[in-house]
Image: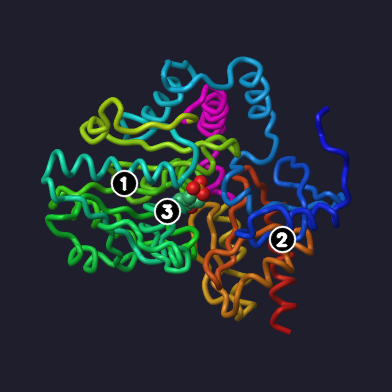
Amino acid sequence: MSDPKPVDTKTLLEWSARYHTPNYGRAPICLVRGDGVRVWDSDGREYLDFAAGIAVAALGHCHPTITGAIREAAATLLHVSNLYHTAPQIHLAKLLCEHSFADRVFFCNSGAEANEAALKLARKYAKERLASDRFEIIATRDSFHGRTLATVTATGQEKYQHGFEPLVPGFKHVPYNDLRAMERALDNRTAAIIVEPIQGEGGVHVPDADYLPGLRKLCDQSGALLILDEVQTGLGRTGKLWGYQHAGVEPDIMTLAKALANGVPMGAMLAREEVARALTPGTHASTFGGTPFVASVALATLTTILGEKIPERAARTGAYLMERLLALARQRPVVRAVRGRGLLIGLELSRPAGPIVDACRDAGLLVLTAGERVLRLAPPLIVDERDCDRALATIDAMLARSTS
Ligand SMILES: *Cc1c(COP(=O)(O)O)cnc(C)c1O
C-alpha cells in the first residue's frame, strides 16, 4: 500500500496546524474510518455521526452498495472529459429527470459550482429571452449558497463576504419567509430568485407553507426564474426526495450536491427544457463534471435512495427524533425552539451552540452548528431509533451540564 508511515495523533495535528491554510476551525481529532452511522478516530475512539459530513453521507459510511459501485467504477473508467459521451452520466441524468420536475441536467463537482451554473443560466436566459438589462438575482438573508465569488455574493451573510469585496454586481437580499419583501424587491430587472426550501447553514429555518407557492406565483407573474438550492435539502433529507415536494410547487432550476454521490464530490444543476436550452454549446463547462466514476457512484446512491424508500424512512425516523427533541426541549429551557423537517433538525439555544457541539464530540457524538446558536442534526438517513435515543441521551446530558 502507498500509505505514509503511521504517525501519532499529536504529530498529525501539529502538521495540520503547520501545513494547511488556516481557513478551517477543525475539531482536534483525526477521523480514519467509518461504518454506517459511526466513525472512528486515530486513537480508536468511536463516534456516533449525526453530522454525516454536513448532510452528505445519506446512506451512511461505507455502504456496501456504494463501496461496490466505487470499486467497480474505479476499475472500469475514471475520467475522459465531456468531449465524449459516457453511459453512467447519461443514465444518471435520465434518472434525475424521471424523478423530478426537470428535463435536463448539468453536472459539476460541488454545491457552489451547481449554484454558479444556475446563476449563470438565469442571467443568460433572462437577457436573451426577456430583456437585455434583466440580470438581477434576489436572494435571502441568512441564506447559504457557497463560497465562489458569485455564490458568496448570493449568500445573505456578511461574515462570509467580509474581505472579498468588491462582490459580484446585480444581487439583492430580502428577509427569508417574507413574501411582501420579495414582492417589493422584484422588478423588471429581476432575472431570478434563489432560495433554499429550508435554510440549512443559516439556522435550519423552515418557511411557512405559503412561502414557496407565493414565490412561484411572483415568478410566474414577473417572468423571473425560481431557483431552488436543494444542495442540503435534496435527495431525501427532509423526508421527501426533494424539499420542494412539501410545498406542492416546482422550481425552474434546482441545484444539488452534498448527498448526490454519498461523499464522492458531485454537484448538479437541473432545469426545465425551455430554460436549459439557453446553455448552448460552449457556454458553460466543467472538466470533471459527471465523470463516469462519480456518475456511477451517484447512480448507485440515487438507485438505493429510491429503491429502499429512504426519504420515507427519513420522514419516519425524523418524526420520532423531532418528537423526542420537543419533549427534551420542554425539560431544558436552554432550548428555545426545535425546527426542521425529516432528518434536518435544528435546536435553537439561548447560548452559543459551539461549546455544546464540542462537549457532544468529547462524549462520542458528532453534531453540527447552524449559525451561532443553533445545534444542527443531520445524521445519515439510514439511522435507526436506537441510535437516535443514544444521540438524544448525549445531547440531553450535555445541555444539562451546560446549564448547571
Ligand atoms: C453546502 C451548501 C452549499 C455549498 O456546497 P459546496 O459543495 O460546499 O460548494 C450551497 N448551498 C447549500 C444550501 C448548502 O447547504
Q: Is residue 275 visible?
A: yes
Q: Nearer the viewer, residue 284 or 73?
A: 284
> Marks 3 and 1, Cα distance to the nearest angstrom?
11 Å
Q: Report the amino acid beneath label 2.
A: Ala
Q: Is residue 163 left or right of residue 328?
A: left
Which quadrant of the rendered structure holds the N terminus? top right
Q: Secondary structure at mark 2?
A: loop
Q: Which residue is mark 2?
A: 27
Q: Is residue 193 left or right of residue 360?
A: left
Report if the CB atoms under discs 1 and 2 are less than 8 Å apart.
Answer: no
Which quadrant of the rendered structure holds the C terminus? bottom right
Residue numbers of the magenta segment: 289-317
Residue 190 found in image quarter: bottom left
Pointer 2 residue Cβ closer than 8 Å to ligand 1: no
Residue 16 image point, x, y percent: 74, 54
Q: Is residue 334 left or right of residue 166?
A: right
Please tell me whether residue 210 is drawn above or below residue 252 in the rendered image. below
Q: Report the amino acid beneath label 1.
A: Leu
Assess disc 3: are there few (<14), some (14-19) or many (≥20) residues with their C-alpha within 10 Å of its C-alpha: many
> Marks 1 and 2, Cα distance to the nearest angstrom?
34 Å
Q: Which residue is mark 3?
A: 145
Q: Is residue 314 magenta?
A: yes
Pointer 3 residue Cβ closer than 8 Å to ligand 1: yes
Q: Is residue 16 left or right of residue 111?
A: right
Q: Nearer the viewer, residue 331 or 222?
A: 222
